[in-house]
Image: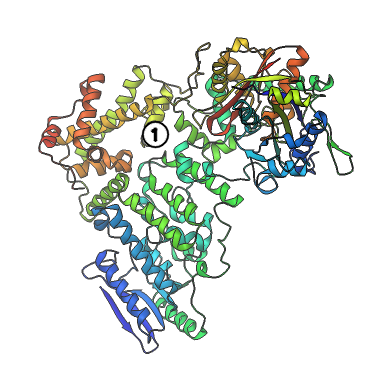
Amino acid sequence: MLNYSVGSDGIASIEWDMPGQAQNLLNDASMTAFAKAIRDALADPSVKGILITSAKNDFIAGGDLEVLMQGGEAQTLFDGTLRWHKLLRAMETGGKPVAAALNGSALGGGMELALACHYRVAADHPQARFGFPEVTLGLSPGAGGTQRVPRLMGIQASLPLLLAPVFGSGVLAPVVGSGVLEGQRIGASAALTVKLIHAVVPPGEERSAARNWLIASIHGGVKPQQPWDSRGYKIPGGGPMTPAGIQLFTGANAMLREKTYGNYPAPRHILSCIFEGLQTDIDTGLKIEARYFVNLVMSPEARNMIRVRHFGINEADTPVAINDSNVSRDVYTKRVFGAYLAEGMALLAEGVAPALIDKAGLIAGMPAGPLAPVVGSGVLALTNKPSIEPAGKIARQAQADPGVERIIERLILIQSLEAARCLAEKVLTRPQDADVSAILDWGYPPFRGGPIGWIHTLGIGKFIADSQRLAAQHGPRFAPPQFLHDMAAKEERFYPA
Amino acid sequence: MAEAYIYDAVRTPRGKGRQGGGLNQATPIHLAATVLRALRERNRLDTSLVDDVVLGCVEPVAEQGADIARVAALYADYAVTAPGVTVSRFCASGLEACNQAAAQIMAGQAELVVGGGVESMSRVPMFSSGGAWPTDPQVAHKTYFTPQGISADLIATKWGYARSDVDGYAIESQRRAKHAWDNAYFRHAIVPVLDINGLVMLAHDEHMRPQTTLDDLAALKPAFQEQGEKYGFDSVILQRYPEVERIEHVHHAGNSSGIVDGAAAVLFGSAAMGKKLGLKPRARIRSFASIGSEPAIMLTGPSYAAEKALQRAGMSVKDIDLFELNEAFAAVVLRFMQVLEISHERINVNGGAIAMGHPLGATGAMILGTLLDELERRDLATGLVTLCVGAGMGTATVIERL
């Protein structure tokens, strides 16, 4: 798991080397081993400095998705998160210099571990990436990333790293479907520019560079300290409640909703970790971060996004991404996405305002409203109509049209129903193919986990009840197929969790 | 229930709320103390009888922080026994302070209370106090936080007010304010702000631009378009109001309330206290009310607040002779008139904040006094004053001359 050795120079080397894996990942076994190694090194009087390295091509790739998919009880998750925080805090306040030699990519929890080191030097590999892809899985960094990154580089500079692409270089790029899934991972020189790392060296020299820094630090005799632990530390650019911070958060909140329609709790919670945590000391900030992290781990959005990603990764390893032919996938797309468009036309025929129908599709998380094809063709114009309040009566307080939630329900459920029929008719055979195809082929919202994933999220029983209610109101196109009734009767599920 | 009477109402002139404005040189404490002194001197008030000083202030930080009402009373040489409390209901703070002052008397727990407000927007700028509403990611998300200029533009969009409608309203506000000043309708209420030597800093509302024409206004760029389009706020409010296709940005500096400095104070007392002091009551409080409504559109509250206050008084819109609705944005007034079927002849008859400015925490108390002066000048009986309020609130007060 880890190769631990102490050199004659007093430097303890902790080399990550997870057996039987191409990459180092953070899971119970590796984290336990690392914690023991750190505690041993801190306790051993002959150890004067600590070097953290990797025997793989990359440093640490992040958290283990298998672990995250298991979920758990809030208290257990919270306690476990705090234990890891405590370990990293012990490492950075233990009085011994700690350096990370980043031989390749350091992502997510791997980058966070490196951030708790006093010195980070990276090999100048063109493929090496550094950053925080957690948000692309519906999660927040859970090992101090939301606290250490802004404390290191300032809040404004931290947002593109932690929230990309919402605030990244592609700020104004439309968030189309899985666009929300793309986290920003930067190269070594960019990481150096934003001060995420301290130095970049030619590949192969990173260990000696880290070792040299440790020796200098040991001989310098100055107690190693993180910036946020030093006396008189101030957040670069100021905290959240400075005039600049107020402006930044006010704008960031709006831009976040503009891009995500409020459907993705992860970027919002990341902003909250920064907003709330950076008005406190680092240890309190880490607790705040842990609370939001646990909330996200348990959220249906993260479970759906992690499940879809998990399938996507596994499928990518096999040459045929979808078991069924591309023709089947085409038929599937035409039927299910077609059902979405047809439902928009049905709403239009019922006299619902076109603007409302179209917006409901976007608020539902779809990349375009269901009327987009007709609007695009110029057949239909979306216009503002002044609303007239009945005069002379007591005017009702303004409310959003209560219809929007119902419209969203119809636009989403009709896709799930058609996808279920496609499974019943063996257009596609596996639910995961239906879900991955929907997200990749027409930008179905990842937070819902795909059309079948959404049935799973609601629960088959509730999905049937909702569909039957809609069938009674709007016709048999909402009638759930028989196999769903059968699954419900046998208490079967599409996915384990 | 005891009756609360208005015995006097004063205000400072409104100075441009920026560097170089006429009152930029005056501290907010000085503005507040100016109106408190005026109440004392005009009414030969024994301030040891004052049960409370309630002042509205929207940005109660820095020079305006730490309970400016109490400190202003001390600075104005009120008896040390006169306590003070600062209240915020955003833009209706000044009226809220008056309502709370009256409420103490109506509840039988006080005999003589000053209500009023102060805001030096030039010295303590808007948004100085921060707050969770726009900044806290969870709060902004839940409430669809939108800056009020965009809310006003949504109102114009939803009710179909074109740029020419809101600009036309603004021109009329300017015309009415000039007419009122030219004919000295405000002379009774205005207290010039003097310096330490007794020299005049400002004696006249200086924000007015009576020479403005429709063509001048037509040339102005919408003020909230960039905020809406570049920073995502149009999208935020359209997610809350999905039936609206897009926001028509029609408001700008010329048809929105001006940023100004000022203070106002209103003297409330019981009937017995009036007799004891030899003061003649000018009006009584018939009712007051505040409401909450959907916070993103934010500024439709005045009609609901007015209806609630009227209902409490057992009155209807037809029973009110004159209305004052703070001209935060032209569309707010246009909607109020449309929804409650009030003709322009009965509302904001001497102009309003578009012409003269809106010193946030003070405005409610200022326009209460303006309404009372005008009822007296026209010898009319009943008036209703109301303001739209941040986060979807509204506050209204119904008064009746004796």
Characterize the local packing of mark 1: few (<14), some (14-19) or many (20 or more) Cα atoms within 10 angstroms: many
Instruction: Please tell me which residue is depicted at 27% across the width and 31% down the height of the picture.
Output: A413
A264 left or right, relative to B99: left
Image quadrant occupied by the N terminus of chain A: bottom left
Display coloring: rainbow
Residue that mark 1 sits on: A362
Decide which of A182, B27 is in the foreground and name it. B27
Q: Is residue A127 visible?
A: no
Compared to residue A301, the image places residue B241 above or below, namely: above
SS for callout 1: helix
A389 or B363: which is nearer to us?
Answer: B363
Residue B70 image offset from top left, x and y in percent: 69, 43
The chain holding disc 1 is: A
Query: Camera-side residue: A327 or B137?
Result: B137
Seen from the viewer's position, the closer of residues B325 and B55 is: B55
Residue displayed at 75% across by 22% down: B275
In the displayed structure, would residue B244 be above or below residue A181?
above
Residue lying farthest to the bottom in this orientation = A8
Residue A38 image offset from top left, x and y in percent: 34, 75
